[in-house]
Image (spheres, helix red, strand yellow):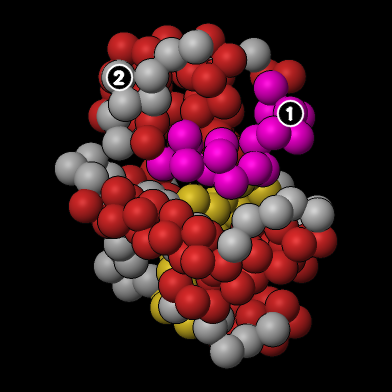
């Protein structure tokens, strides 16, 4: 069984995907981490994330980079959004994601184009969303827990900018796949969001 989970940044799709993988006994891939690794590699190379050539060169990042704690930073998230607009980068990472999805027994993948591009034939497609305000508040609380000094207004602006890039990019724009089940987590806590997703998948496969 392949479960595709898409949605904008800080919508809760990562948390939900991990929970779905654990519940249904499937391997999980956070595809956004691949793009974060590319963005981080561009930074380490001293390149320009808006330059297609620099971004493509960074797709050859070493596997060890996926364990770099800097990948979860707001700065790297912004770089990931910028490198992901390049069609050449998306093509370079496509096969890695597709192979993961097609492994024996299935998998759970989360990202922004899983149900539309990577696994359009997925057995279940979910689109996890939430308001900019709700997503910014969650990310701000995460930053506070990590004792990082950033304002809520800065995070809201960053999320809105990422949404604009992701939705309006020419290649694989962020959108709900045809037939996707949409779950708005704006007013849901972690447990309720996970429960809603599990219920949606179980309903879809029965």
Q: Which residue is mark 1?
A: 68
Give whichever of 165, 89 is nearer the camera: 165
- Secondary structure of the residue carrying tag 1 is loop
Q: Please provide percent x and percent y for residue 148.
A: 74, 52
* The C terminus - image quarter: bottom right
- Which secondary structure dominates the residues rendered in magenta? helix
| Viewer-side residue, 33 vs 96 | 33
Q: Residue at x 58, y 15 (%)?
A: 44
Quarter-wise, where is residue 132 in the image?
bottom left
> In the current view of this chain or complex, which residue is farthest to the left?
170
Whether the magenta-drawn stretch holds residue 76 is answered as: yes
Mark 2 = which residue? 51
N-term mark: 1 or 2: 2
Q: Residue at x 56, y 50 (%)?
A: 109
- Does residue 55 appear to the left or right of 172 in the view shown? right
109 sits left or right of 81 in the view: right
User: Where is residue 190 shown, x and y percent of the image?
Assistant: 72, 78
At 75% from the left and 82% from the top, the residue drawn is 191
Q: Is residue 117 left or right of residue 73?
A: left
Boundaries of the magenta span = 65-81
Residue 2 left/right relative to 93: right
Q: Is residue 12 visible in this depiction of the protein?
A: no
Q: What is the CA distance from the residue labelled 1 to the residue labelled 2?
A: 23 Å
């Amino acid at each position: 069984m392949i479960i595709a989970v898409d949605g904008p940044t800080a919508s809760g799709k990562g948390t939900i995907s991990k929970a779905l993988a654990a519940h249904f006994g499937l391997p999980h891939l956070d595809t956004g981490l691949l793009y974060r690794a590319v963005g981080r590699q561009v930074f380490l190379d001293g390149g320009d994330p808006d330059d297609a050539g620099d971004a493509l060169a960074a797709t050859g990042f070493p596997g060890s980079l996926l364990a770099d704690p800097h990948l979860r930073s707001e700065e790297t998230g912004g770089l990931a959004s910028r490198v992901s607009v390049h069609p050449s980068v998306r093509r370079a990472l496509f096969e890695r994601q597709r192979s993961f999805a097609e492994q024996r027994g299935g998998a759970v993948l989360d990202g922004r184009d899983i149900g539309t591009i990577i696994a359009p034939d997925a057995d279940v497609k979910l689109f996890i969303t939430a308001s900019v305000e709700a997503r910014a508040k969650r990310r701000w609380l995460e930053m506070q827990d990590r004792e990082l000094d950033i304002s809520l207004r800065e995070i809201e602006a960053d999320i809105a900018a990422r949404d604009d890039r992701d939705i309006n990019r020419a290649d694989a724009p962020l959108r709900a796949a045809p037939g996707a089940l949409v779950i708005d987590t704006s007013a849901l806590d972690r447990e309720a969001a996970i429960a809603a997703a599990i219920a949606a998948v179980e309903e879809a496969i029965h």
